[in-house]
Image: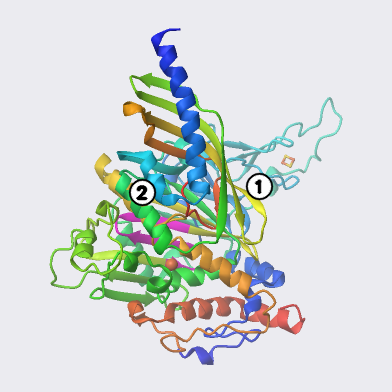
Amino acid sequence: MNAKTMPVAAGSEPNAVDYAVYHSQAIFTAEQENIFRGQTWCYLGLEAELANSGDFRSTHVGNTPVVVTRATDGTIHAWVNRCAHKGATVCRSLRGNQADGAFVCVYHQWAYDATGALVGVPFRRGMKGVGGYQADFDPAEHSLERLRVESFAGMVFGTFSPAIAPLEDFLGPVMRKYISRVFQRPVKVLGYARQFMAGNWKLYSENSRDSYHGALLHLFYPTFGIYRQSQESAGELSEEGFHNVFTVSKPKGDVDYGSFGDEANREMQGEAKLQDERLLAFRPEIADDVGLHIQSIFPSVVVQQIQNTLATRQIVPHGTDRTELVWTYFGYADDDEETTRHRLRNLNLVGPSGLISMEDGEAVELCQQGTIGAEGKRSFVEMGGDDVRQYYAPMGMDENSVRGFWKGYLGLMGNALADLAAEGRA
Amino acid sequence: MSAAAEVAQVAQSAIDDFNAAYGLCLDDDRLEQWPNLFVDDCLYQVIARENVDNGLPAAVMYCDSRAMLVDRVVALRKANVFPEHFNRHLIGRAVITGVEGDQVSAEASYVVFQTRNDGETRIYNAGKYVDRFDLSGGTVRLKSRTCIYDTLRIATLLATPI
Ligand code: FES
Ligand SMILES: [Fe+2]
Protein backbone atom coordinates (compact mmCIF):
# COMPACT_ATOMS: atom_id res chain seq x y z
CA MET A 1 0.00 0.00 0.00
CA ASN A 2 1.32 3.43 -0.84
CA ALA A 3 1.82 5.40 2.34
CA LYS A 4 0.61 8.53 0.63
CA THR A 5 -2.86 7.09 0.25
CA MET A 6 -3.16 6.67 4.03
CA PRO A 7 -5.64 8.95 5.69
CA VAL A 8 -3.92 12.10 6.84
CA ALA A 9 -4.31 12.61 10.56
CA ALA A 10 -3.43 15.97 11.99
CA GLY A 11 -1.07 16.48 9.08
CA SER A 12 0.87 13.25 9.68
CA GLU A 13 1.60 10.51 7.18
CA PRO A 14 3.78 7.43 7.64
CA ASN A 15 6.64 9.15 5.85
CA ALA A 16 6.17 12.59 7.44
CA VAL A 17 5.04 12.82 11.03
CA ASP A 18 4.13 16.00 12.86
CA TYR A 19 6.61 16.48 15.71
CA ALA A 20 3.66 17.27 17.98
CA VAL A 21 3.21 13.52 18.44
CA TYR A 22 6.25 13.49 20.74
CA HIS A 23 5.18 16.42 22.90
CA SER A 24 1.41 16.76 23.08
CA GLN A 25 -0.15 15.71 26.37
CA ALA A 26 -3.52 15.41 24.60
CA ILE A 27 -2.04 12.95 22.11
CA PHE A 28 -0.36 11.00 24.92
CA THR A 29 -3.70 10.68 26.71
CA ALA A 30 -5.44 9.63 23.50
CA GLU A 31 -2.76 6.99 22.91
CA GLN A 32 -3.48 5.40 26.27
CA GLU A 33 -7.12 5.07 25.24
CA ASN A 34 -6.72 4.16 21.59
CA ILE A 35 -3.58 2.07 21.65
CA PHE A 36 -2.55 0.71 25.04
CA ARG A 37 -6.07 0.28 26.42
CA GLY A 38 -7.46 -0.08 22.91
CA GLN A 39 -7.23 -2.61 20.10
CA THR A 40 -3.83 -4.10 20.92
CA TRP A 41 -2.26 -6.88 22.93
CA CYS A 42 0.46 -5.58 25.23
CA TYR A 43 3.40 -7.57 26.54
CA LEU A 44 3.18 -8.33 30.27
CA GLY A 45 6.19 -10.58 30.87
CA LEU A 46 7.41 -14.12 30.41
CA GLU A 47 5.79 -17.30 31.65
CA ALA A 48 9.26 -18.18 32.96
CA GLU A 49 8.91 -15.29 35.43
CA LEU A 50 5.77 -16.90 36.80
CA ALA A 51 7.02 -20.43 37.24
CA ASN A 52 5.10 -21.25 40.41
CA SER A 53 1.57 -20.62 41.54
CA GLY A 54 1.49 -17.43 43.59
CA ASP A 55 4.28 -15.83 41.54
CA PHE A 56 3.55 -12.28 40.48
CA ARG A 57 5.26 -9.46 38.64
CA SER A 58 4.34 -5.79 38.52
CA THR A 59 4.26 -4.42 35.02
CA HIS A 60 2.50 -1.77 32.94
CA VAL A 61 0.19 -1.55 29.99
CA GLY A 62 0.91 1.89 28.63
CA ASN A 63 1.11 4.01 31.78
CA THR A 64 -1.45 1.85 33.62
CA PRO A 65 0.07 -0.21 36.44
CA VAL A 66 -0.81 -3.87 36.01
CA VAL A 67 0.07 -7.01 37.96
CA VAL A 68 0.42 -10.37 36.25
CA THR A 69 0.00 -13.44 38.44
CA ARG A 70 -0.11 -17.21 38.38
CA ALA A 71 -3.09 -18.54 40.32
CA THR A 72 -3.22 -21.74 42.35
CA ASP A 73 -4.69 -23.63 39.40
CA GLY A 74 -1.71 -22.60 37.25
CA THR A 75 -3.57 -20.11 35.08
CA ILE A 76 -2.12 -16.67 34.40
CA HIS A 77 -4.08 -13.52 35.18
CA ALA A 78 -3.58 -9.79 34.98
CA TRP A 79 -5.35 -6.95 36.73
CA VAL A 80 -4.99 -3.24 37.12
CA ASN A 81 -3.06 -2.49 40.30
CA ARG A 82 -5.74 -0.18 41.66
CA CYS A 83 -7.87 -1.04 44.66
CA ALA A 84 -11.59 -1.14 43.94
CA HIS A 85 -12.19 0.76 47.19
CA LYS A 86 -10.28 4.04 46.85
CA GLY A 87 -7.83 3.38 44.10
CA ALA A 88 -4.75 2.64 46.19
CA THR A 89 -1.91 0.56 44.77
CA VAL A 90 -2.62 -2.98 45.94
CA CYS A 91 0.60 -4.80 45.10
CA ARG A 92 3.61 -2.75 46.17
CA SER A 93 6.46 -5.05 45.11
CA LEU A 94 8.10 -5.46 41.73
CA ARG A 95 7.85 -9.22 41.90
CA GLY A 96 7.48 -12.05 44.36
CA ASN A 97 5.37 -14.95 45.43
CA GLN A 98 2.10 -14.57 47.28
CA ALA A 99 1.98 -18.07 48.68
CA ASP A 100 -1.52 -17.75 50.20
CA GLY A 101 -2.79 -16.28 46.93
CA ALA A 102 -4.15 -13.17 48.65
CA PHE A 103 -3.26 -9.65 47.58
CA VAL A 104 -4.27 -7.32 50.38
CA CYS A 105 -4.55 -3.58 50.00
CA VAL A 106 -2.78 -2.11 53.04
CA TYR A 107 -5.11 0.89 53.32
CA HIS A 108 -8.33 -0.83 54.51
CA GLN A 109 -7.30 -4.41 53.89
CA TRP A 110 -9.57 -5.34 51.05
CA ALA A 111 -8.24 -8.71 49.90
CA TYR A 112 -8.14 -10.02 46.36
CA ASP A 113 -7.13 -13.39 45.00
CA ALA A 114 -4.67 -13.91 42.16
CA THR A 115 -7.45 -13.59 39.59
CA GLY A 116 -8.35 -10.15 40.93
CA ALA A 117 -11.59 -11.23 42.63
CA LEU A 118 -12.47 -9.47 45.87
CA VAL A 119 -12.43 -12.18 48.52
CA GLY A 120 -12.42 -10.30 51.79
CA VAL A 121 -13.59 -6.97 53.21
CA PRO A 122 -12.93 -6.28 56.92
CA PHE A 123 -15.88 -5.17 59.00
CA ARG A 124 -18.25 -5.78 56.13
CA ARG A 125 -21.12 -5.95 58.63
CA GLY A 126 -19.71 -3.14 60.69
CA MET A 127 -18.69 -3.45 64.31
CA LYS A 128 -21.12 -4.33 67.03
CA GLY A 129 -23.98 -3.55 64.71
CA VAL A 130 -22.63 -0.12 63.79
CA GLY A 131 -21.47 0.80 60.30
CA GLY A 132 -20.69 -1.78 57.64
CA TYR A 133 -21.89 -2.06 54.10
CA GLN A 134 -25.50 -2.34 52.98
CA ALA A 135 -26.95 -5.84 52.83
CA ASP A 136 -26.87 -5.72 49.02
CA PHE A 137 -23.10 -5.11 48.88
CA ASP A 138 -21.86 -7.67 46.35
CA PRO A 139 -18.11 -8.37 46.40
CA ALA A 140 -18.35 -9.66 42.83
CA GLU A 141 -19.04 -6.10 41.72
CA HIS A 142 -15.88 -4.81 43.36
CA SER A 143 -13.19 -6.91 41.85
CA LEU A 144 -10.02 -5.47 40.39
CA GLU A 145 -10.22 -4.45 36.75
CA ARG A 146 -9.10 -7.50 34.82
CA LEU A 147 -7.39 -7.86 31.48
CA ARG A 148 -7.77 -10.67 29.00
CA VAL A 149 -4.55 -12.68 29.10
CA GLU A 150 -3.07 -14.96 26.45
CA SER A 151 0.40 -16.39 25.92
CA PHE A 152 2.36 -17.29 22.88
CA ALA A 153 5.57 -19.37 23.08
CA GLY A 154 6.12 -18.27 26.67
CA MET A 155 5.45 -14.55 26.16
CA VAL A 156 2.44 -13.29 28.10
CA PHE A 157 0.25 -10.55 26.69
CA GLY A 158 -2.82 -8.76 27.99
CA THR A 159 -5.53 -6.58 26.51
CA PHE A 160 -8.26 -4.32 27.83
CA SER A 161 -10.29 -4.93 24.71
CA PRO A 162 -13.13 -7.44 24.96
CA ALA A 163 -13.45 -7.33 21.17
CA ILE A 164 -9.96 -7.75 19.80
CA ALA A 165 -9.14 -11.03 18.01
CA PRO A 166 -7.02 -13.63 19.83
CA LEU A 167 -3.34 -12.90 20.43
CA GLU A 168 -2.19 -15.28 17.70
CA ASP A 169 -4.19 -13.33 15.12
CA PHE A 170 -2.85 -10.03 16.43
CA LEU A 171 0.71 -11.31 16.04
CA GLY A 172 0.08 -12.91 12.67
CA PRO A 173 1.97 -15.82 11.11
CA VAL A 174 5.23 -13.98 10.40
CA MET A 175 5.64 -12.64 13.94
CA ARG A 176 4.70 -15.99 15.43
CA LYS A 177 7.30 -17.75 13.32
CA TYR A 178 10.07 -15.44 14.53
CA ILE A 179 8.96 -15.44 18.19
CA SER A 180 9.05 -19.23 18.08
CA ARG A 181 12.57 -19.01 16.71
CA VAL A 182 13.87 -17.22 19.83
CA PHE A 183 11.67 -19.19 22.19
CA GLN A 184 12.60 -22.50 20.58
CA ARG A 185 13.31 -24.07 23.98
CA PRO A 186 12.18 -23.29 27.53
CA VAL A 187 13.93 -20.18 28.82
CA LYS A 188 15.23 -19.01 32.18
CA VAL A 189 15.49 -15.39 33.23
CA LEU A 190 19.02 -14.08 33.83
CA GLY A 191 18.07 -10.66 35.13
CA TYR A 192 16.81 -7.16 34.44
CA ALA A 193 18.02 -3.72 33.51
CA ARG A 194 15.87 -0.61 33.52
CA GLN A 195 16.69 2.34 31.40
CA PHE A 196 14.87 5.64 31.73
CA MET A 197 14.90 7.93 28.75
CA ALA A 198 13.82 11.56 28.66
CA GLY A 199 12.01 10.98 25.41
CA ASN A 200 8.72 9.84 23.92
CA TRP A 201 7.97 6.12 23.66
CA LYS A 202 7.44 6.39 19.91
CA LEU A 203 10.99 7.61 19.41
CA TYR A 204 12.17 4.32 20.88
CA SER A 205 9.61 2.38 18.82
CA GLU A 206 10.97 4.01 15.68
CA ASN A 207 14.53 3.37 16.81
CA SER A 208 14.06 -0.36 17.27
CA ARG A 209 12.60 -0.56 13.75
CA ASP A 210 15.23 1.69 12.18
CA SER A 211 18.00 -0.40 10.67
CA TYR A 212 19.32 2.64 8.77
CA HIS A 213 21.04 4.05 11.88
CA GLY A 214 22.78 0.81 12.84
CA ALA A 215 26.11 1.30 11.14
CA LEU A 216 26.02 5.08 11.45
CA LEU A 217 25.17 5.72 15.10
CA HIS A 218 26.67 2.59 16.61
CA LEU A 219 30.37 2.83 15.79
CA PHE A 220 31.67 -0.08 17.84
CA TYR A 221 32.08 -2.48 14.93
CA PRO A 222 33.85 -0.08 12.55
CA THR A 223 36.03 1.28 15.35
CA PHE A 224 37.40 -2.18 15.94
CA GLY A 225 37.66 -2.87 12.23
CA ILE A 226 34.88 -5.38 12.20
CA TYR A 227 33.28 -5.04 8.79
CA ARG A 228 30.71 -7.56 7.82
CA GLN A 229 29.54 -6.31 4.46
CA SER A 230 28.99 -9.75 3.06
CA GLN A 231 26.23 -10.51 5.53
CA GLU A 232 22.70 -11.15 4.44
CA SER A 233 19.78 -9.35 5.93
CA ALA A 234 16.06 -9.83 5.74
CA GLY A 235 13.15 -7.77 6.99
CA GLU A 236 9.50 -8.58 7.24
CA LEU A 237 6.47 -6.65 8.41
CA SER A 238 3.12 -7.82 9.66
CA GLU A 239 0.15 -7.06 7.48
CA GLU A 240 -0.78 -3.80 9.27
CA GLY A 241 2.87 -2.77 9.17
CA PHE A 242 3.19 -2.10 12.87
CA HIS A 243 5.11 -5.23 13.83
CA ASN A 244 8.39 -5.95 12.15
CA VAL A 245 11.42 -8.18 12.32
CA PHE A 246 14.82 -8.02 10.78
CA THR A 247 17.59 -10.55 10.85
CA VAL A 248 21.23 -10.54 9.81
CA SER A 249 22.99 -13.78 9.00
CA LYS A 250 26.37 -14.90 7.87
CA PRO A 251 26.77 -15.22 4.14
CA LYS A 252 25.73 -18.53 2.67
CA GLY A 253 28.45 -21.06 1.88
CA ASP A 254 31.16 -19.03 3.55
CA VAL A 255 33.85 -20.18 5.93
CA ASP A 256 32.94 -21.17 9.44
CA TYR A 257 31.89 -18.16 11.44
CA GLY A 258 32.27 -19.63 14.88
CA SER A 259 33.74 -16.36 16.05
CA PHE A 260 33.18 -12.85 14.77
CA GLY A 261 36.41 -12.11 16.58
CA ASP A 262 38.38 -14.20 14.12
CA GLU A 263 36.75 -12.32 11.33
CA ALA A 264 37.71 -9.07 12.99
CA ASN A 265 41.35 -10.07 12.89
CA ARG A 266 41.16 -11.13 9.26
CA GLU A 267 39.59 -7.96 8.06
CA MET A 268 40.87 -5.55 10.61
CA GLN A 269 41.10 -2.06 9.23
CA GLY A 270 40.14 0.06 12.22
CA GLU A 271 42.67 1.80 14.39
CA ALA A 272 41.88 -0.29 17.41
CA LYS A 273 42.11 -3.99 17.97
CA LEU A 274 39.81 -5.79 20.33
CA GLN A 275 41.84 -7.09 23.25
CA ASP A 276 39.41 -9.77 24.40
CA GLU A 277 37.47 -11.30 21.54
CA ARG A 278 35.34 -13.44 23.82
CA LEU A 279 33.14 -10.36 24.12
CA LEU A 280 31.97 -10.87 20.55
CA ALA A 281 32.19 -14.63 20.22
CA PHE A 282 29.09 -16.15 18.69
CA ARG A 283 28.01 -19.74 19.15
CA PRO A 284 25.14 -20.46 16.79
CA GLU A 285 22.55 -22.37 18.78
CA ILE A 286 19.51 -22.18 16.57
CA ALA A 287 19.45 -24.13 13.36
CA ASP A 288 20.18 -21.14 11.14
CA ASP A 289 23.01 -18.65 10.76
CA VAL A 290 21.23 -15.65 12.23
CA GLY A 291 23.46 -13.59 14.52
CA LEU A 292 21.03 -10.72 14.96
CA HIS A 293 17.26 -10.86 15.27
CA ILE A 294 15.39 -7.73 16.29
CA GLN A 295 11.64 -7.96 16.36
CA SER A 296 9.38 -5.10 17.35
CA ILE A 297 5.87 -6.05 18.39
CA PHE A 298 3.51 -3.11 18.46
CA PRO A 299 3.02 -1.31 20.74
CA SER A 300 5.28 -2.20 23.59
CA VAL A 301 7.90 -4.90 23.20
CA VAL A 302 11.04 -5.81 21.32
CA VAL A 303 12.31 -9.38 21.18
CA GLN A 304 15.98 -9.80 20.43
CA GLN A 305 18.74 -12.24 19.82
CA ILE A 306 22.06 -10.49 19.27
CA GLN A 307 24.92 -12.96 19.19
CA ASN A 308 24.04 -15.14 22.19
CA THR A 309 22.10 -12.49 24.06
CA LEU A 310 18.39 -13.08 24.38
CA ALA A 311 16.10 -10.39 25.72
CA THR A 312 12.75 -8.73 25.70
CA ARG A 313 12.65 -4.97 25.96
CA GLN A 314 9.37 -3.68 27.32
CA ILE A 315 8.50 -0.09 26.52
CA VAL A 316 6.67 1.72 29.34
CA PRO A 317 5.46 5.22 28.50
CA HIS A 318 5.29 7.24 31.73
CA GLY A 319 4.75 10.62 30.09
CA THR A 320 5.25 12.47 26.83
CA ASP A 321 8.98 12.73 27.55
CA ARG A 322 9.52 9.91 30.02
CA THR A 323 9.94 6.37 28.77
CA GLU A 324 11.17 3.37 30.68
CA LEU A 325 12.73 0.44 28.92
CA VAL A 326 12.70 -2.78 30.93
CA TRP A 327 15.24 -5.28 29.64
CA THR A 328 14.56 -8.87 30.63
CA TYR A 329 17.59 -11.01 29.80
CA PHE A 330 17.22 -14.73 29.48
CA GLY A 331 18.97 -17.88 28.41
CA TYR A 332 17.71 -21.38 27.79
CA ALA A 333 16.66 -23.45 30.77
CA ASP A 334 19.21 -26.15 29.94
CA ASP A 335 22.20 -23.75 29.73
CA ASP A 336 25.20 -24.94 31.69
CA GLU A 337 27.25 -22.55 33.80
CA GLU A 338 29.78 -21.91 31.08
CA THR A 339 27.07 -21.05 28.56
CA THR A 340 25.54 -18.62 31.03
CA ARG A 341 28.93 -16.96 31.53
CA HIS A 342 29.28 -16.65 27.78
CA ARG A 343 25.86 -14.95 27.60
CA LEU A 344 26.87 -12.56 30.39
CA ARG A 345 29.98 -11.63 28.42
CA ASN A 346 27.93 -11.08 25.25
CA LEU A 347 25.51 -8.91 27.26
CA ASN A 348 28.20 -6.21 27.23
CA LEU A 349 27.00 -5.56 23.70
CA VAL A 350 23.40 -4.69 24.57
CA GLY A 351 21.34 -2.93 27.20
CA PRO A 352 21.89 0.47 28.83
CA SER A 353 25.68 -0.05 28.74
CA GLY A 354 25.68 -1.96 25.48
CA LEU A 355 28.78 -1.39 23.38
CA ILE A 356 26.71 -1.62 20.20
CA SER A 357 23.45 -0.20 21.52
CA MET A 358 23.86 2.34 24.32
CA GLU A 359 23.60 5.15 21.77
CA ASP A 360 19.90 4.46 21.25
CA GLY A 361 19.07 6.09 24.60
CA GLU A 362 20.96 9.19 23.54
CA ALA A 363 19.32 9.26 20.09
CA VAL A 364 15.85 9.18 21.66
CA GLU A 365 16.70 12.10 23.95
CA LEU A 366 18.30 14.12 21.14
CA CYS A 367 15.12 13.82 19.03
CA GLN A 368 12.97 14.77 22.02
CA GLN A 369 15.11 17.84 22.77
CA GLY A 370 15.45 18.81 19.13
CA THR A 371 11.72 18.82 18.43
CA ILE A 372 10.68 21.09 21.28
CA GLY A 373 8.62 23.88 19.81
CA ALA A 374 8.46 22.17 16.42
CA GLU A 375 4.74 21.36 16.37
CA GLY A 376 3.45 21.59 12.81
CA LYS A 377 6.85 20.67 11.37
CA ARG A 378 7.28 17.13 10.10
CA SER A 379 9.94 14.44 9.99
CA PHE A 380 11.25 13.02 6.72
CA VAL A 381 11.05 9.23 6.64
CA GLU A 382 11.75 8.41 3.01
CA MET A 383 14.91 6.30 3.02
CA GLY A 384 14.13 3.45 0.66
CA GLY A 385 10.90 5.05 -0.60
CA ASP A 386 7.73 6.45 0.85
CA ASP A 387 5.67 3.29 0.86
CA VAL A 388 5.23 0.37 3.25
CA ARG A 389 6.25 -3.03 1.91
CA GLN A 390 5.95 -6.37 3.58
CA TYR A 391 9.48 -7.52 2.69
CA TYR A 392 12.64 -5.49 2.55
CA ALA A 393 16.40 -5.74 2.97
CA PRO A 394 17.15 -3.61 6.02
CA MET A 395 20.93 -3.55 5.52
CA GLY A 396 20.09 -1.88 2.23
CA MET A 397 19.26 1.33 4.09
CA ASP A 398 15.52 1.46 4.32
CA GLU A 399 13.07 3.10 6.71
CA ASN A 400 10.31 0.83 5.50
CA SER A 401 9.49 -0.55 8.91
CA VAL A 402 9.51 2.89 10.55
CA ARG A 403 6.84 3.87 8.02
CA GLY A 404 5.11 0.61 8.88
CA PHE A 405 5.00 1.67 12.53
CA TRP A 406 3.42 5.00 11.65
CA LYS A 407 0.97 3.39 9.27
CA GLY A 408 -0.26 1.15 12.08
CA TYR A 409 -0.15 3.94 14.63
CA LEU A 410 -2.09 6.36 12.45
CA GLY A 411 -4.59 3.62 11.69
CA LEU A 412 -5.33 3.26 15.40
CA MET A 413 -5.03 6.95 16.21
CA GLY A 414 -6.36 8.51 13.02
CA ASN A 415 -9.72 9.72 14.23
CA ALA A 416 -8.40 10.70 17.64
CA LEU A 417 -5.68 12.84 16.06
CA ALA A 418 -8.16 14.41 13.68
CA ASP A 419 -10.53 15.21 16.55
CA LEU A 420 -7.73 16.73 18.61
CA ALA A 421 -6.64 18.77 15.61
CA ALA A 422 -10.20 19.97 15.05
CA GLU A 423 -10.35 21.06 18.67
CA GLY A 424 -7.04 22.82 18.18
CA ARG A 425 -5.36 20.68 20.82
CA ALA A 426 -2.80 18.85 18.74
CA MET B 1 47.82 -6.55 68.37
CA SER B 2 47.44 -9.94 66.69
CA ALA B 3 49.04 -10.49 63.30
CA ALA B 4 45.62 -10.79 61.66
CA ALA B 5 44.43 -7.56 63.24
CA GLU B 6 47.56 -5.84 62.07
CA VAL B 7 47.03 -7.03 58.48
CA ALA B 8 43.43 -5.84 58.63
CA GLN B 9 44.51 -2.41 59.86
CA VAL B 10 47.08 -2.04 57.10
CA ALA B 11 44.53 -3.26 54.59
CA GLN B 12 41.94 -0.79 55.86
CA SER B 13 43.98 2.27 55.13
CA ALA B 14 45.43 0.83 51.91
CA ILE B 15 41.95 0.07 50.57
CA ASP B 16 40.47 3.40 51.63
CA ASP B 17 43.35 5.15 49.89
CA PHE B 18 42.86 2.95 46.85
CA ASN B 19 39.13 3.68 46.67
CA ALA B 20 39.69 7.42 46.90
CA ALA B 21 42.20 7.22 44.07
CA TYR B 22 39.89 4.94 42.06
CA GLY B 23 37.08 7.51 42.21
CA LEU B 24 39.32 10.38 41.20
CA CYS B 25 40.84 8.35 38.36
CA LEU B 26 37.39 7.97 36.80
CA ASP B 27 36.11 11.43 37.70
CA ASP B 28 39.24 13.15 36.36
CA ASP B 29 38.68 11.30 33.09
CA ARG B 30 41.92 9.32 33.34
CA LEU B 31 40.07 6.32 31.96
CA GLU B 32 43.15 4.79 30.32
CA GLN B 33 44.65 4.33 33.81
CA TRP B 34 41.53 2.65 35.17
CA PRO B 35 42.28 -0.91 33.89
CA ASN B 36 45.66 -0.73 35.64
CA LEU B 37 43.85 -0.75 38.97
CA PHE B 38 42.90 -4.38 38.27
CA VAL B 39 44.90 -7.60 37.99
CA ASP B 40 44.96 -9.23 34.53
CA ASP B 41 42.60 -12.01 35.45
CA CYS B 42 40.00 -9.77 37.04
CA LEU B 43 36.25 -9.50 37.16
CA TYR B 44 34.48 -6.16 36.97
CA GLN B 45 30.72 -5.98 36.83
CA VAL B 46 27.95 -3.45 37.28
CA ILE B 47 24.77 -5.19 38.30
CA ALA B 48 21.34 -4.13 39.52
CA ARG B 49 20.57 -4.86 43.15
CA GLU B 50 17.22 -6.32 42.08
CA ASN B 51 19.17 -9.03 40.25
CA VAL B 52 21.58 -9.75 43.09
CA ASP B 53 18.72 -9.95 45.59
CA ASN B 54 16.91 -12.45 43.37
CA GLY B 55 19.97 -14.55 42.60
CA LEU B 56 20.04 -13.43 38.96
CA PRO B 57 23.44 -12.95 37.31
CA ALA B 58 22.81 -10.49 34.44
CA ALA B 59 24.95 -7.35 34.69
CA VAL B 60 24.97 -4.27 32.48
CA MET B 61 28.77 -4.47 32.34
CA TYR B 62 30.53 -7.80 32.76
CA CYS B 63 34.26 -7.84 32.10
CA ASP B 64 36.12 -10.95 33.17
CA SER B 65 39.57 -9.86 32.06
CA ARG B 66 41.59 -6.65 32.19
CA ALA B 67 41.72 -6.78 28.39
CA MET B 68 37.95 -6.37 28.35
CA LEU B 69 38.28 -3.26 30.52
CA VAL B 70 40.71 -1.84 27.99
CA ASP B 71 38.20 -2.62 25.21
CA ARG B 72 35.54 -0.75 27.20
CA VAL B 73 37.74 2.33 27.46
CA VAL B 74 38.72 2.29 23.78
CA ALA B 75 35.06 1.92 22.79
CA LEU B 76 34.14 4.78 25.10
CA ARG B 77 36.78 7.05 23.62
CA LYS B 78 36.30 6.16 19.96
CA ALA B 79 32.94 4.58 19.33
CA ASN B 80 30.26 5.19 21.90
CA VAL B 81 27.95 8.18 21.82
CA PHE B 82 26.54 9.41 25.13
CA PRO B 83 25.57 12.68 26.79
CA GLU B 84 28.57 14.82 27.70
CA HIS B 85 28.93 14.55 31.44
CA PHE B 86 31.06 14.72 34.54
CA ASN B 87 30.79 12.03 37.19
CA ARG B 88 31.67 12.52 40.85
CA HIS B 89 32.23 9.52 43.10
CA LEU B 90 31.75 9.67 46.85
CA ILE B 91 33.00 6.42 48.33
CA GLY B 92 32.45 5.51 51.96
CA ARG B 93 34.99 3.93 54.27
CA ALA B 94 35.57 0.30 53.37
CA VAL B 95 34.45 -2.51 55.62
CA ILE B 96 36.90 -5.40 55.57
CA THR B 97 34.90 -8.63 55.28
CA GLY B 98 37.70 -11.19 55.01
CA VAL B 99 41.47 -11.55 55.06
CA GLU B 100 43.34 -14.52 53.62
CA GLY B 101 47.02 -13.72 53.52
CA ASP B 102 47.35 -10.79 51.14
CA GLN B 103 43.91 -11.39 49.62
CA VAL B 104 41.36 -9.10 51.23
CA SER B 105 37.61 -8.86 50.75
CA ALA B 106 35.89 -5.56 51.42
CA GLU B 107 32.73 -3.61 50.77
CA ALA B 108 32.10 0.11 50.48
CA SER B 109 29.09 2.30 49.70
CA TYR B 110 29.32 4.69 46.80
CA VAL B 111 27.30 7.44 45.19
CA VAL B 112 27.97 8.78 41.72
CA PHE B 113 26.64 12.24 40.95
CA GLN B 114 26.40 13.21 37.32
CA THR B 115 26.44 16.66 35.81
CA ARG B 116 25.46 17.09 32.18
CA ASN B 117 25.48 20.09 29.89
CA ASP B 118 22.30 21.50 31.38
CA GLY B 119 24.41 22.16 34.47
CA GLU B 120 22.26 20.29 36.93
CA THR B 121 23.93 17.73 39.18
CA ARG B 122 21.84 14.62 39.72
CA ILE B 123 22.25 11.49 41.78
CA TYR B 124 23.09 9.15 38.95
CA ASN B 125 23.93 5.86 40.60
CA ALA B 126 24.05 4.74 44.23
CA GLY B 127 25.14 1.37 45.47
CA LYS B 128 27.99 -0.57 46.96
CA TYR B 129 31.21 -2.13 45.85
CA VAL B 130 31.77 -5.74 46.75
CA ASP B 131 35.49 -6.26 46.25
CA ARG B 132 38.36 -8.66 46.41
CA PHE B 133 41.75 -7.04 46.58
CA ASP B 134 45.19 -8.41 45.87
CA LEU B 135 47.64 -6.68 48.22
CA SER B 136 50.65 -8.73 47.17
CA GLY B 137 53.89 -7.09 46.06
CA GLY B 138 53.26 -3.90 48.00
CA THR B 139 50.53 -2.71 45.61
CA VAL B 140 46.76 -2.71 45.86
CA ARG B 141 44.90 -4.07 42.88
CA LEU B 142 41.40 -5.33 42.34
CA LYS B 143 40.84 -9.00 41.67
CA SER B 144 37.17 -8.35 41.43
CA ARG B 145 34.81 -5.42 41.85
CA THR B 146 31.06 -5.89 41.70
CA CYS B 147 29.17 -2.59 41.64
CA ILE B 148 25.72 -3.43 42.95
CA TYR B 149 23.50 -0.47 42.17
CA ASP B 150 20.31 0.46 44.03
CA THR B 151 19.37 3.00 41.37
CA LEU B 152 17.07 0.67 39.49
CA ARG B 153 16.54 2.91 36.55
CA ILE B 154 19.59 4.06 34.70
CA ALA B 155 19.17 7.60 33.40
CA THR B 156 19.56 7.47 29.59
CA LEU B 157 22.49 5.03 29.56
CA LEU B 158 25.57 4.01 31.50
CA ALA B 159 28.77 4.61 29.58
CA THR B 160 31.49 5.58 32.04
CA PRO B 161 32.44 2.88 34.55
CA ILE B 162 31.27 3.16 38.12
S1 FES C 1 -8.04 1.78 49.25
FE1 FES C 1 -7.72 -0.33 49.20
S2 FES C 1 -8.85 -1.02 50.88
FE2 FES C 1 -9.23 1.08 50.92
FE1 LIG D 1 20.26 1.20 17.70
For this orientation, the residue located farthest to the right is A130
Left or right: residue A50 versus residue A273 is right
| Residue where numbered disc 1 is placed | A143
Alpha carbon of mark 2 to alpha carbon of mark 1: how far?
A: 53 Å
Does B98 appear above or below B108?
A: above
Provide the major secondary structure of the magenta segment: strand
For this orientation, the residue located farthest to the front is B138
Q: Residue at x 72, y 82 (%)?
A: A421
Query: Residue A79: image x %, image y %?
Result: 59, 50
- Chain part drawn in magenta: A296-313
- B98 and A419: which is toward the camera: B98
Number of numbered discs on residues: 2
Q: Amino acid at mark 1?
A: Ser
**Mark 2 element type:** helix
Q: Of the residues tagged 2 and 1, which is closer to the observer?
A: 2
In which quarter of the view is residue B138 placed?
top left
Disc 2 and disc 1 in contact, CB within 8 angstroms: no
| Residue where numbered disc 2 is placed | B69
**Mark 1 element type:** loop
Q: Amino acid at mark 2?
A: Leu
- Viewer can see residue A256: yes
- A99 and A343: which is toward the camera: A343
Query: Residue A238: image x %, image y %?
Result: 41, 75
Label 1 resides on the chain identified as A
Quadrant where the C terminus of chain A lies? bottom right
Does A179 appear above or below A414?
A: above
Q: Residue at x 56, y 82 (%)?
A: A379
Quadrant where the N terminus of chain A lies? bottom left
- Viewer can see residue B150: no
Query: Residue A118: image x %, image y %?
Result: 65, 42
Left or right: residue A8 versus residue B32 is right
The chosen color scheme is rainbow
